[in-house]
């Protein structure tokens, strides 16, 4: 088992090293000093940001899959010791990947499976996340013509959850960290009861229609001051699959406005954005039409939200600081207590 985990953790560390080298090269190319780069990376490390937060999640998932792989290898060894010659592929996930789904019910010798790829060997779309198993081909104790779905409870969205509930609910999210949102005290109880209502918002839509979050203390303190003592900081968990990231340490506008540059990064045609904005102006007004068009087009590209990272120590009120905008309020839950 130690060999399996050691190899997989080495791969994770190697990939993170390559990512860091690429990010540092991009930062230097944009003119950042080494001290500024060091401060940015240290901030990411201490807050569990995109770089090191992703590394932590990969280590956790690697340990989990390594333990599973070691267990599977042990079971296969016992089967072979008992003289089992043929093994059958069984899918465990409710929604197996296309590669694994095609193998459901297929049988072969262990030599055959080692040649074409065993579960968690990396041959499939799901790679090390594979939950499939190889069992004795003559085993008749289950209905093996269908995936064996493990009886794990699916956690449904609720406006407010305990930390344990929220961590179960967002366990597959690309963002597992806790973020904060600042609002009026009088709104907190309503948000925890019904969730965020963004339909009637008249302001705070610079980067689209959604809920604005941050884990940057300077940004949160700024917005709390805007409520003149009536602001309340609430903590939240996020459940998203795809987030567009605009890092001002790396990304450049190349002569476009920042909003247009963000849309171009997402693969949006700026003419489509302008046309959609114009068509919405009569009903929503200028700012409302702009926010709605921006949001619709990013969602159409599959994005659940937008993350903006400002340069360390360069808070800009027009940009709003380092923050995340989540377009669907049901991708957010307030933490109780």
Image (cartoon, rainbow, N blue to C red):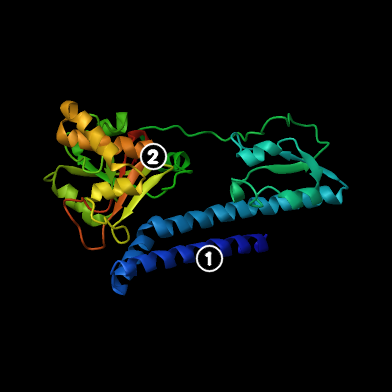
The residue pinned by badge 1 equals: 14
Q: Which quadrant of the figure contains the N terminus? A: bottom right
**Which residue, as the protein is rendered here, is positioned at the far front?**
271
Residue 72 location (% of width, % of height):
71, 49
The total of numbered circles placed on residues is 2
Q: State the residue in front, 314 or 272.
A: 272
Q: Neighbour class for label 2 at 10 Å: few (<14), some, many (≥20)?
A: some
**Which residue, as the protein is rendered here, is positioned at the far left?**
228
Res 281 visible: yes
Note whether 5 is above or below 214 in the view shown: below
Res 333 visible: no
Is residue 287 rendered to the left or right of residue 50? left
Residue at 29% over, 51% down: 308
Spatial CA span between label 2 and label 1 = 31 Å
Is residue 60 rendered to the left or right of residue 200? right
Q: Which quadrant of the figure contains the C terminus? A: top left
Residue 9 location (% of width, % of height):
57, 62
Q: State the residue in front, 154 or 113.
A: 113
Contact (CB < 8 A) between labels 2 and 1? no
Q: Quadrant of residue 303?
A: top left
Residue at 73% over, 49% down: 116
Instruction: Determine the secondary structure under disc 2.
Output: loop
Note whether 139 is above or below 17 in the view shown: above
- Between circles 2 and 1, the one closer to the viewer is 2
Q: State the residue in front, 262 or 148.
A: 262
**Mark toward the start of the polypeptide (2 vs 1):** 1
Q: Quadrant of residue 297?
A: top left
The residue pinned by badge 2 equals: 301
Residue 134 location (% of width, % of height):
74, 43
């Amino acid at each position: 088992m130690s060999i399996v985990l050691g190899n997989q953790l080495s791969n994770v560390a190697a990939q993170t090293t390559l990512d860091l080298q690429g990010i540092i090269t991009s930062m230097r190319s944009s003119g950042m000093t080494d001290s500024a780069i060091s401060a940015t990376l240290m901030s990411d490390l201490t807050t569990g940001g995109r770089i090191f937060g992703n590394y932590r999640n990969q280590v956790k998932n690697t340990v989990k899959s390594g333990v599973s792989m070691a267990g599977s290898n042990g079971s296969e060894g016992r089967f072979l010791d008992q003289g089992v010659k043929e093994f059958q592929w069984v899918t465990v996930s409710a929604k197996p990947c296309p590669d694994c789904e095609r193998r459901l019910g297929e049988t072969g010798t262990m030599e055959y499976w080692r040649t074409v790829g065993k579960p968690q060997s990396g041959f499939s779309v799901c790679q090390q996340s594979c939950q499939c198993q190889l069992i004795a081909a003559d085993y008749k104790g289950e209905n093996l013509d269908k995936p064996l779905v493990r009886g794990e409870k699916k956690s449904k969205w609720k406006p407010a959850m305990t930390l344990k509930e929220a961590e179960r609910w967002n366990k597959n999210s690309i963002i597992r960290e806790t973020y904060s949102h600042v609002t009026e005290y009088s709104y907190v109880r309503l948000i925890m009861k019904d969730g965020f209502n963004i339909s009637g918002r008249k302001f705070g839509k610079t980067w689209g229609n959604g809920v604005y979050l941050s884990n940057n203390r300077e940004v949160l303190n700024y917005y709390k001051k805007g409520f003149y003592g009536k602001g309340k900081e609430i903590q939240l968990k996020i459940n998203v699959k795809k987030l567009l990231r605009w890092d001002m340490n790396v990304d450049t506008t190349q002569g476009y406005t920042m909003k247009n540059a963000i849309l171009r990064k997402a693969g949006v045609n700026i003419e489509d954005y302008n046309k959609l904005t114009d068509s919405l102006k009569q009903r929503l007004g200028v700012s409302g039409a702009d926010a709605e068009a921006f949001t619709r087009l990013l969602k159409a590209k599959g994005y659940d939200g937008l993350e903006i990272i400002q340069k360390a120590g360069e808070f800009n009120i027009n940009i709003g600081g380092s923050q995340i905008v989540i377009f669907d309020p049901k991708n957010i839950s307030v933490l109780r207590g």
